[in-house]
Image: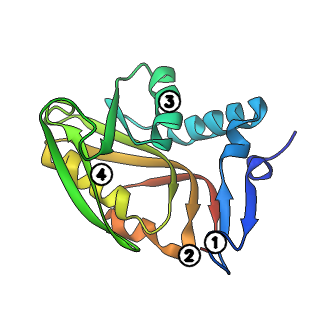
Amino acid sequence: MKKLEEYVRSIPDFPEPGIIFRDITSVLQDADGLRLAIDTMQGLIKDLDFDVVVGPESRGFIFGTPLAYINKKPFVLIRKKGKLPCATVEKTYDLEYGTATIEIHKDAIKPGQKVLIVDDLIATGGTTEAMVELIEELGGKVVGVVVLMELAGLKGRERLNGVPLYSAITYEGK
């Protein structure tokens, strides 16, 4: 049986020299790889107490929805600015080159709800930090973040201010 890491395609020098791009499409395109990814992430959170699963556009949708389904919890979308149809709250954060803005519906998280964030990757942690701030603005409490991959060398974990991070795969570099 293959290990989860063996399903991830590593592409050297993309998008620039010296970077190793960790491609999840190879995980998704293999039925056994996809099943192993979801099962592994579920195993990491099996004892976590949460009320709702939140996932960001777009890869957070891929991994968050099945985890919400397995745990019989609702799934809440975080999307890029201008994509949600009802009243939203938004957060702008810095990227390596420029900024990005994400939004969540104002009524998506109820005060006091315990929230699990699910995504494919944590790198520098900027997107995840922005999601935590949006959820807290609505009165929710983020009880954990689970990701398929963590690029530990980029120190995204440090931006989570003590929120537990569960990683199915950890790459020590960038």
Residue at the spot of label 2: 153
Identify the image's colour scheme: rainbow, by chain, secondary structure or one colour.
Answer: rainbow
**Quadrant in the picture for the C terminus:** bottom right
86 horizontally vs 54: left or right: left
Where 148 sits versus 75, above or below?
below
* Nearer the observer, 54 or 162: 54
**Residue depth check, mark 1 versus mark 4: number of the one nearer the observer:** 4
Residue at 23% from the left image edge and 42% from the top image edge = 82
Residues tagged 2 and 1 counted as in contact (Cβ below 8 A): yes
Residue at the spot of label 3: 67
Residues tagged 4 and 3 counted as in contact (Cβ below 8 A): no
Instruction: Report, in whole angstroms, how far the alpha carbon at label 3 lies from the one at label 1.
Output: 26 Å
Kindly identify the amino acid type of the residue bearing the numbered disc 4: Met
Kindly identify the amino acid type of the residue bearing the numbered disc 2: Gly
**Residue 135: x %, y % from top left:** 22, 45
Residue at the spot of label 4: 131
Secondary structure state at the residue bearing disc 1: loop
69 horizontally vs 32: left or right: left
Kindly identify the amino acid type of the residue bearing the numbered disc 3: Leu
Q: Earlier in the sequence, mark 1 or mark 4?
A: 4
* Nearer the observer, 24 or 165: 24
Q: Earlier in the sequence, mark 2 or mark 3?
A: 3
Report whether residue 50 is seen. no
121 horizontally vs 79: left or right: right
Q: Earlier in the sequence, mark 2 or mark 4?
A: 4
Secondary structure state at the residue bearing disc 2: helix
Instruction: Report, in whole angstroms, how far the alpha carbon at label 2 lies from the one at label 3.
Output: 27 Å
Estimate how packed mark 2 is, as few (under 14), some (14 to 19) or many (20 or more) residues with alpha carbons within 10 Å: some
